[in-house]
């Protein structure tokens, strides 16, 4: 069986639908083309069905380094919004904190390794919905480590974040995005 004959998941259908909607918002598809293609995308059974819908659209793949190092002596390191997550992220800060919001990020890898080296600082990692995090290799001497209902076992199709490292006096929190009650 070729790769194009393999069955697609709901996530694959949704990702294709999002790409079609982006193409519409850029003016690459008209309303009728969008509606026709979305109908096919949401009922697609194989990768061949999906690829036929997007093969005439440009592909924008973010360039992601395998390893990115973020350093600060006493500042706040923050990444959020639409950013490209590397395969391995090293965060070093003596007195500062780190906030890594992966909920809207582009994650091209199934597994993301995050190494934290924080002396007096704390870290917060916000996972995309359905993501999992293993924090077994992270140590906090005097702080606390919280995963707030985040599973640690890998799941098919879900981003798996592996957190390693240590903090002497800080803490680590791993959670999902907060629900927004008031939206326009």
Image (cartoon, rainbow, N blue to C red):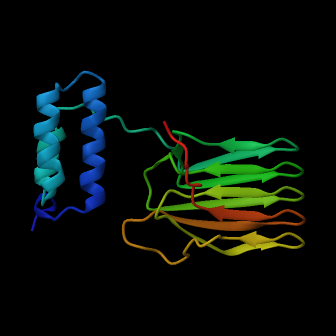
| 61, 154: nearer the viewer | 154
User: Where is residue 7 shown, x and y percent of the image?
Assistant: 16, 65
| 88, 53: nearer the viewer | 53
Toward the top, the furthest residue is 27
Quadrant into which the N terminus falls: bottom left
- Residue drawn 72% across the image and 52% down it: 91
Judge whether 145 appears above or below 122 on screen: below
- Residue drawn 16% across the image and 24% down it: 30
Tell me where residue 162 sits by quadrant: bottom right
- Residue drawn 70% across the image and 50% down it: 99
**Total of numbered circles in the picture?**
0
57 left or right of 97?
A: left
154 left or right of 142?
A: left
User: Where is residue 176 shown, x and y percent of the image?
Assistant: 57, 60
41 left or right of 177?
A: left
User: Where is residue 140 shown, x and y percent of the image?
Assistant: 82, 71
126 left or right of 17?
A: right
- Residue drawn 26% across the image and 30% down it: 23
């Amino acid at each position: 069986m070729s790769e194009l004959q393999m069955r697609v998941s709901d996530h694959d259908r949704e990702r294709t639908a999002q790409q079609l909607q982006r193409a519409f918002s850029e003016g690459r598809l008209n309303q009728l083309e969008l509606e026709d293609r979305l109908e096919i995308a949401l009922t697609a059974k194989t990768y061949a069905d999906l690829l036929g819908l997007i093969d005439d659209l440009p592909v924008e793949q973010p360039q992601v380094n395998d390893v990115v190092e973020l350093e600060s002596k006493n500042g706040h390191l923050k990444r959020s919004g639409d950013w490209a997550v590397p395969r391995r992220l090293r965060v070093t800060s003596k007195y500062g904190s780190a906030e890594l919001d992966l909920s809207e990020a582009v994650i091209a890898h199934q597994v993301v390794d995050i190494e934290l080296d924080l002396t007096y600082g704390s870290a917060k990692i916000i996972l995309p919905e359905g993501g999992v995090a293993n924090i077994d290799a992270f140590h906090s001497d005097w702080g606390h480590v919280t995963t707030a209902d985040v599973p640690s076992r890998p799941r098919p199709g879900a981003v798996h974040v592996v957190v390693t490292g240590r903090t002497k006096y800080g803490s680590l929190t791993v959670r999902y995005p907060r629900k927004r009650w008031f939206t326009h």
